[in-house]
Image (cartoon, grey):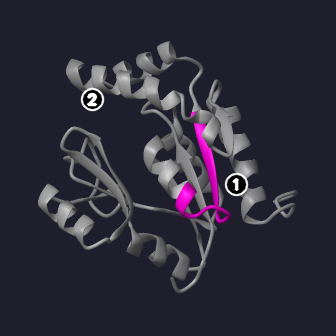
């Protein structure tokens, strides 16, 4: 690695609000840059290749795994892979920025272990599993089978929360965003965040 930088990892079960919080932080803290994950799933809604994800074929993904081009990857759902390319982290560090991740729980754990000391791992906790189920169902983007798969995964993922550096309770989105902003600024430049 040319230049070692810092990483901020936001993980949570799907529907906990991590993406909204990460977007808020990207709009408020210029020192951050989003790490774009690679995935084998199809784009949803308005998602764009190279902005939201790098959408690649399963064959291409497996080829890159074999060439050890990922710092972490998961088969998140059966046949659907997600991962972080090493080149993506290097690209952001070369710009002198801090990498911010919006990543599933297992991927977050891998990154935390790999970059221990350089990373701040934050687990976004929803008010309850029932609220999470309501949020996911309310999106209207998944089939009943896919929703059921997400619920089962979410129940398991909530058990990982204590292994993260910080558990950020997202009971009120505005409060969670403000707390996240404080934590991130403090991590990037300790005690320099006051008055910014």
Which region shows up in magenta? 113-124
Name the side, left or right, on which 85 lies relative to 77. right
Q: Nearer the viewer, residue 29 or 60?
A: 60
The residue that appears at 48% across and 54% down in the rendered structure is: 110
For the residues marked 2 and 1, what is the alpha-carbon distance in whole angstroms? 31 Å
| Residue 102 in view in this figure | no
User: Quick one: SS at disc 1?
Assistant: helix
Farthest residue in the top direction?
130
Name the side, left or right, on which 26 lies relative to 166. left
The residue that appears at 73% across and 41% down in the rendered structure is: 179
Question: Is the residue 172 above or below the residue 123 in the image?
Answer: above
Q: Is residue 122 magenta?
A: yes
The residue that appears at 46% across and 33% down in the rendered structure is: 13
| Residue 30 point in image, percent of width and height | 63, 66
| Residue 185 point in image, percent of width and height | 74, 58
Task: Identify the residue under disc 2.
Answer: 141
Task: Identify the residue under disc 1.
Answer: 184
Quarter of the figure with the C terminus: bottom right
Question: Is the residue 142 above or below the residue 131 in the image?
Answer: below
Mark 2 neighbour density, 10 Å: few (under 14) some (14–19) many (20 or more): few
Q: Quadrant of residue 169?
A: top right
User: Quick one: SS at disc 2?
Assistant: loop
The residue that appears at 29% across and 25% down in the rendered structure is: 149
């Amino acid at each position: 690695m040319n230049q070692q930088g810092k990483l901020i990892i936001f993980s949570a079960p799907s529907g906990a609000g991590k993406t909204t919080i990460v977007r808020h932080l990207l709009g408020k803290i210029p020192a951050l840059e989003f790490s774009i994950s690679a995935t084998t799933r199809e784009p949803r809604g308005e998602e764009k290749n190279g902005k939201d994800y790098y959408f690649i074929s399963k064959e291409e993904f497996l080829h890159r795994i074999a060439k050890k081009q990922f710092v972490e990857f998961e088969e998140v759902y059966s046949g659907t892979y997600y991962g972080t390319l090493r080149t993506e982290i290097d690209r952001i560090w070369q710009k002198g920025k801090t990498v911010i991740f919006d990543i599933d729980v297992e991927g977050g754990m891998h990154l935390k272990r790999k970059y221990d000391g350089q990373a701040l791992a934050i687990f976004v906790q929803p008010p309850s599993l029932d609220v999470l189920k309501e949020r996911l169902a309310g999106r209207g983007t998944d089939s009943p089978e896919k929703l059921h798969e997400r619920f089962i995964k979410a129940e398991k993922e909530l058990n990982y929360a204590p292994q993260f550096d910080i558990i950020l309770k997202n009971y009120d989105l505005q409060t969670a965003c403000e707390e996240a902003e404080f934590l991130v600024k403090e991590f990037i430049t300790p005690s320099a965040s006051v008055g910014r």
